[in-house]
Image (cartoon, helix red, strand yellow):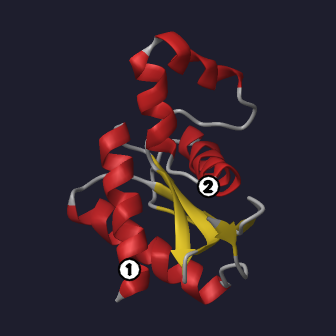
Amino acid sequence: MTYGRAIGTEESKKAAAAALAEARANNWKMAVAVVDPAGFLVYFEKIDDTQPASVAVAQAKARSAALFRRPTKGFQDMLASGGEGLRVVGLEGAVPVEGGTPIVAGERIVGAIGVSGGTSAQDGQCAKAGIGGLLN
C-alpha cells in the first residue's frame, strides 16, 4: 500500500471524536492521536483524567502505524509469538501494543490513529471506532 494525501484536521477531529465516543460509552479514559503519513501529529484529544503516559503512547502508536503501514497489533502478535517475532523489539519506532491503525482512503494511507489509556484490546476497539467514524 502506498501513501496518499495527508489527512486533514477536520477528518482527524471526526476520527478522534468517534474513538472517544466509544471510550466514553465504555467508561474508559483514553487519549487519541491522529498523524499524517509521515507520522507527524495532526490532531490530539484526551478525556479528562486519562493517565499522563497515554498522551505519548497514543502518539507513538499512531506514528508506528503510519510509518510501518500496518496496525500495531501486528507487532504485538509478532512479539507474543516469540522466536523470530522477538526481532520486533529491534525495530526503531515499532510499537508492539494494539491501538495504532493506519487510516486508508482510496487504497492509500493518509495517516493513522493511535489510542491509549485502556487495555490493548480496549485501545484497539476505540481505534477501530475512530476509523469507522470516518466512514459515516
Q: Measuring 21% from the left and 57% from the top, which residue is drawn there?
A: 26
Quadrant (top left/top right/bottom left/bottom right) for the C terminus: bottom left
Which sits in the foreground, 78 or 36? 78
Residue placed most toward the observer, 50 or 16: 16
Q: Could one spot residue 62 in this view of the protein?
A: yes
**Three-letter amino acid code of the residue under disc 1:** Gly
- Horizontal and vertical percent for residue 52? 57, 42
**Residue 63 placed where, x, y %?**
67, 52
Task: Provide the residue designation for mark 2.
Answer: 69
| Mark sitting on residue 133 | 1
Helix, strand or loop for disc 1: helix
Residue 43 appears in the picture as rendered: no
Instruction: Give me the residue at 70% from left, 78% from top.
Output: 4
What's the residue at 66%, 84% (across, down)?
Answer: 9
Q: Which amino acid does the dot numbered 2 rest on?
A: Arg
Residue 92 in which image quadrant: top right
